[in-house]
Image (cartoon, rainbow, N blue to C red):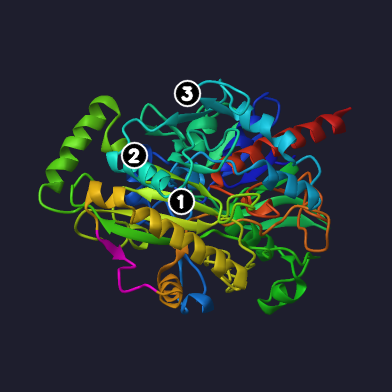
Amino acid sequence: MPDYDYIIVGAGSAGSVLANRLSADGTTRVCLLEAGKPDNSFLINVPFGILGLLTSKTYNWYFNTAPQVNLNNRRLYWPRGKTLGGSSSINAMIYARGVPADYDEWEALGAPGWGWDAVLPVFKQLENNERGADDFHGSGGELNVADLRNPNPLSELFVAAAAEAGQPINRDFNGASQEGVGAYQVTQKNGRRFSAARAFLDAAKGRANLIILTEAHVAKILLEGKRATGVEVKTTDGMQRLMARREIILAGGAVNSPQLLLLSGIGPRAALAKHGIEPLHDLPGVGQNLQDHLDATIIIKDKTKRSIGIGPGAAITMLKALLEYRKSGSGLFASNAAEAGGFVRLAPESKRPEIQLHFLPTMLRNHGRTLTPGYGMTLHCCQLRPKSRGYIGLKSNDPFAAPLIQPNYLSHDDDLAELLAGYKLGRRIMNTALMKSAAGGVEVEPGANVASDAQVIEHIRNSAETIYHPVGTCKMGHDDMAVVDDRLRVHGIANLRVVDASIMPRVIGGNTNAPVMMIGEKAARMILADRNEAAV
């Protein structure tokens, strides 16, 4: 007999939901495999620990891209979560869904049942919004969504400055309208990070029919003809084969899921042959259609020293903040760093915001890996709907080597034009009279000497980075480049699904964490419905 009914590869935002739902009735044996370590870390539990998580390899795959031709041949750093909860354990905890048109677009592209009217009830069921339930929000779900406890006063200043620059103030980016600026809601509870693992795995860990294995890196999907039967996995006890009676479900994310398919002989025939992998199933879309939000920053100084900075007295400030956090779960250590922001349209006729803003009351360079002494503020400006497309490939047939990540940033001219316009808008906000009078800030990045469009473009090419939202590499649909159908079943392979950000046909207009949990929930319902139908 097979070891399990379901094997889930990846304990991230979707995998955590799946493990909870598929094991809930106690009648099925479920195995959840996570390549990373357990998530019992101070850095993970404390929201402000994000700055340490982005610079550490302990809970982070620490990927790097191929050189980017349109970013002056730089290799960009791509942090991705490698622990229970996946990237929800190392992200900025922002709760955002995108706009209804994003999901209606999925449906129009060949994914029936994934339009806004279908996904909104799922979002609401998962959510416990501390503001209470309404037409757009749920109460009583597993995922806690809260307002920040003690936002930095500079975050409030940013919102006021953006309003001075003509942007509407929005108290709820997931409400009737996304457009505007304001404070983000976050996946926190009592001042602690509330990852997918906290929300969905904690309640399921005690179930006898759910086995959770950490430090378990899957090397290959096992096939019998065109049917998935198990996985080959490296654990602390060595290589093992685990077999599944019903399904193998990949939930490794937009990087790891296509990589595993390729390593298993599922993908474009020529790409597999290049690395000496036997092509067991020719599926040309595997790894293709990669999309990500590219981001450029503006940094100004803060003469009031209300920002989070490195300078005289900073150590004492941090010690006091730590004591406050331990006492009440509030203060600086409850901050998600990216406290405020918003969504802006570049023209009155725009149907959806093209640009997202993330404001940080600190100077942040190179994902926090480059320490910047002094006090200041950073505004991130990212383009929400890039037309550039890249791919995930293999560097070798070694299952434990990093994959080839080629986002092809700014390969479409429209992307550079939109990012430039968004960056200029962000720059106007950071240089309003209110911002200068209240904080006395001088722009340090890009700086006054960067004035012309050509100079700003060169600055973007030298400094733009990911804002951590890769999707699309196992896209959902029914065209020749689709990898999964609208029930997330891999085309041409029985008993194999992909359930994570890779199935998005197009990236949504916002942070991707909440949508991936929604994908996990919808997939679990489909899997259980298929099981029950088969049992009749």
What segment carries the magenta color?
A: 442-451
- Check contact, mark 3 vs mark 1: CB within 8 A: no
Which tag, 2 or 3, sits closer to the chain's start? 3
Residue found at x 21% / y 30%: 324
Name the residue carrying label 1. Answer: 357
Name the amino acid type tagged 1: Leu
Q: Toward which corner of the image does residue 464 lie, by quadrant?
A: bottom left
Image: 268 above or below 503: below
Mark 3 lies on a secondary structure that is loop
For the residues labelled 2 and 3, the Cα–Cα distance comes to 21 Å
Query: Residue 226: horizontal and vertical position, in percent?
Result: 83, 56
Q: What residue did someone put label 2 on?
A: 156
Is residue 445 highlighted in magenta? yes
Task: Confirm whether the magenta stretch covers residue 536.
Answer: no
> Is 46 or 250 nearer to us in this picture?
46
Q: Which residue is mark 3?
A: 130
- Who comes first in sequence, dot 1 or dot 2? 2
Badge 2 amino acid: Glu
First in sequence: mark 3 vs mark 1: 3
Residue 285 seen from this side: yes
Split into 4 quadrants, where in the image is the N terminus?
top right
Please, which residue is most extreme toward the left here?
312
Report the side of 427 relative to 204 (left or right): left
